[in-house]
Image (tube, helix red, strand yellow):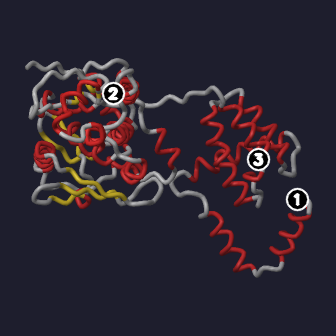
Amino acid sequence: MSQSTKMEDNQDNILCTPPEIREIAKNTVQNLLPDKSREEYMKQYEKFESWCNQNNIHVISENVLLGYFELKRTKYKPSTLWTIYSMLRSCLSVHKNVDISKFNKLQALLKRASQHYTPKKSKILEENNINTFLSDADDKTYLAMKVILIMGYNGACRREELTNMCVDDIQYRADSIMVVIPKTKNYVPRTFLVTDENWIHLIKKYANLRPKRVTHRRFFLTYRNGYCINCPMGINMIGKVPKIIAAFLKLSDPEHFTGHCFRRSSATHIANSGGDLLTIKRLGGWKSSGVAETYVEASLQNKIDVANMFAQQKDLNLPGCSTSTASEQEININSDRSKTVPDSKNNEQNLSSTHGLTVNSKDNSKVNINIYNNCTFQQPMSN
């Protein structure tokens, strides 16, 4: 069935639908787009509609989308192209009943545009960087930033999650602080805990500075010279905190420490500490394993650990060294001795003829064979 036939059938169905039901359906369709970014979705859809009108295009086909994105490819980065594709896919499905996710050639075009493209990612704060800032920075100037760092690092928080954090989301316990993030990007609530005593002390110290007559429930307030004022901290200011921390620590390229720094630093630390992918996904609330992996930075220490694994395997395969364990070698030696040394009278003769051993002793002597590093060494004996 052609697309024009489908449109005629849809028009017939609309005419057969009562007016009040059509109005309900129309309002429902408008709510299918995300509330937060609905304007951006409609903006991209209107641009596409305008382009179609300029080129006298009345039927949406795969060739139309191929031509549209081929022109966009010369102006935008591959990551932006995928964003536009995602927005148009939702809008065309809602308004035109066209499913462009089935356009295989279009997806092949976008994948080809992504080849040899390395997206820019925020730099991460190493564990020693975090500890240095928390211990060396002056609380009178940096206390609020310390608490933002602790919360963002422990919970792998986005900057908007830190901005919207409320005092009701924080529960103080005897030996820990539990933080609930009710509103997330993928609508899945998350919970994390802070258990370090020094970090708990900093959070409580900042919370106690909250003015009594605050007209809102936002947790992070503007902090100046050791005091909090009745003004919530904005998302742009919270997004600049990693950059300010990097500048304080005199790290290279502090402008590359963006609002995603805490989130990537947290995921990388869990990976370097031996955490599996499921733990990382739960920490950051990622549904896709592929997306979660992109947040893990390949640290130098992780590469050193991998190289040490190869070095240890090489040592085990050195000439003259057995790959069997020391206990296995001891069992084999005792087994061979029981076969080749039937009685004590022939101990000296049999041991002397054993390959790799030189024994000069009298009867009723005790022989100890020590094995070091999985290798058997020749041990001379005196009378």
- Residue type, numbered disc 1: Gln
Q: Residue at x 33, y 52 (%)?
A: 164
The image's mark for residue 3 is: 1
Mark 1 and mark 2: Cα distance apart in space: 57 Å
| 152 to the left or right of 228 | right
Q: Residue at x 37, y 19 (%)?
A: 253
Which of the two marks, 1 or 2, is nearer to us in this view? 2
In front: 308, or 8? 308
Which secondary structure, mark 2? helix
Crowding at dot 3, Cα within 10 Å, few <14 / some 14-19 / many 20+, comes out as: few
Q: Circle 2 is placed at which residue position?
A: 301
Mark 2 and mark 3: Cα distance apart in space: 51 Å
Which of the two marks, 2 or 3, is nearer to us in this view? 2
| Whole-percent x, y for residue 81 in the image | 66, 37
| 201 to the left or right of 94 | left
Q: Circle 3 is placed at which residue position?
A: 49
Mark 3 and mark 1: Cα distance apart in space: 17 Å
- Residue type, numbered disc 2: Gln
In front: 75, or 262? 262
Which secondary structure, mark 1? helix
Q: Is residue 339 above or below residue 212?
A: above
Pointer 3 and pointer 1: residues touching (CB < 8 Å)? Answer: no
| Whole-percent x, y for residue 129 in the image | 24, 28
